[in-house]
Amino acid sequence: MHHRQSGDGDGAGGSIGAELCRQILASSPKELILLDISEFALYHVDREIKSLCQRQGLRFPVVTLLGSVRDEQRLESIFRTFSVDTVYHAAAYKHVPMVEYNVSEGVANNVHGTWSAAWAAHRAGVDTFVLVSTDKAVRPTNIMGASKRFAELILQGLSQIETETRFCIVRFGNVLGSSGSVVPLFREQISTGGPVTVTHPEVSRYFMSIREAAQLVLQAGALGTGGDVFVLDMGEPVRIVELAERMIRLSGYDTEQDNVFGEHVEVEYIGLRPGEKLHEELLLGTSVTGTGHPMIMRAEEES
């Protein structure tokens, strides 16, 4: 978000969308538009953002709008009415098993929704459109990942036409503490005495905090020239069973493996879910170039 400009966050009620909105406040935008299809989620993020503005003495309009990213005409109207400069497109269905069994809705939201939002941004002359993507879009083995890869290709395709809009993609792995992440699930399972369910003993994932991920999305959005795929440095992948065992011990319990006496919580392997990979990747190719930011790389990939 550039200083004194108007920004829109769709999917504002989700974990990443809400954190993006919190961090955009620091740039003192001219106006902040929050868009989400969920009245409940939008109500809560609206209250939080307005409370933060009041506590920090920030004085700019925060507009909350209910709506679907599939409604291209409404989105174009919103972008024109509020002279939106930057769109952060965080709206998506992201839970792999859920999307696997709800294919049409997953594709409608993740693919058609991205097309509608991006095309509306192009028609309205929005300056920058940033797609929040995922490592599951790299050589996808499930519907959710394939839909996000399709969304990436849409933006790369639009960047080839004559347009005033700069389209860019930010791709990263799992976000700690986001809705549906393993951390709150493990915490809940530990609190009820277990077992803590892990799909496979060798499964691993990249992790980053919500705060860090949102901060890097905002920074990457300012770097793109059009059609760029930015990949965040996620560090080394973490074995999920090691994360589970660490959380069990930090909660004051033993695992089954190190239990001698006292309470313990077991780890139970339940098998890989349909479309789930053992290990995720962040790159389609093998080469990246630097951006001047130590944690943001530009992927060299053919669209």
Image (cartoon, rainbow, N blue to C red):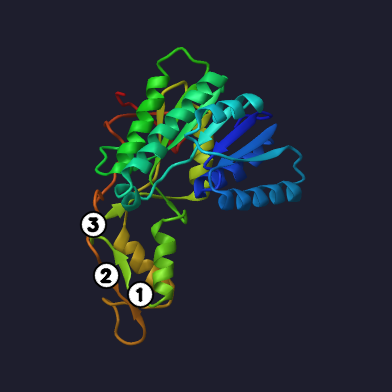
Taking the spot 50% from the left edge, 46% from the top edge, the residue there is 16
Q: Which mark is residue 194?
A: 1
Image quadrant assignment for residue 158: top left
Specify few, some or many for label 3: CA neighbours under 10 Å numbering under 14, 14-19, or 20 or more: some
* Disc nearer the start of the sequence (2/1): 1
102 on left or right of 188: left
Q: Which residue is mark 3?
A: 272
> On screen, 252 above or below 227?
below
Residue type at numbered disc 1: Gly
- Marks 2 and 1 close (CB-CB < 8 Å): yes
The percent position of residue 271, horizontal first and vertical second, equals: 22, 61
Residue type at numbered disc 2: Glu
Q: CA distance from mark 1 to mark 3?
A: 19 Å
Q: How many marks?
A: 3
> On screen, 137 above or below 242?
above
Taking the spot 65% from the left edge, 26% from the top edge, the residue there is 81
The percent position of residue 285, horizontal first and vertical second, equals: 27, 31
The percent position of residue 114, horizontal first and vertical second, equals: 44, 32
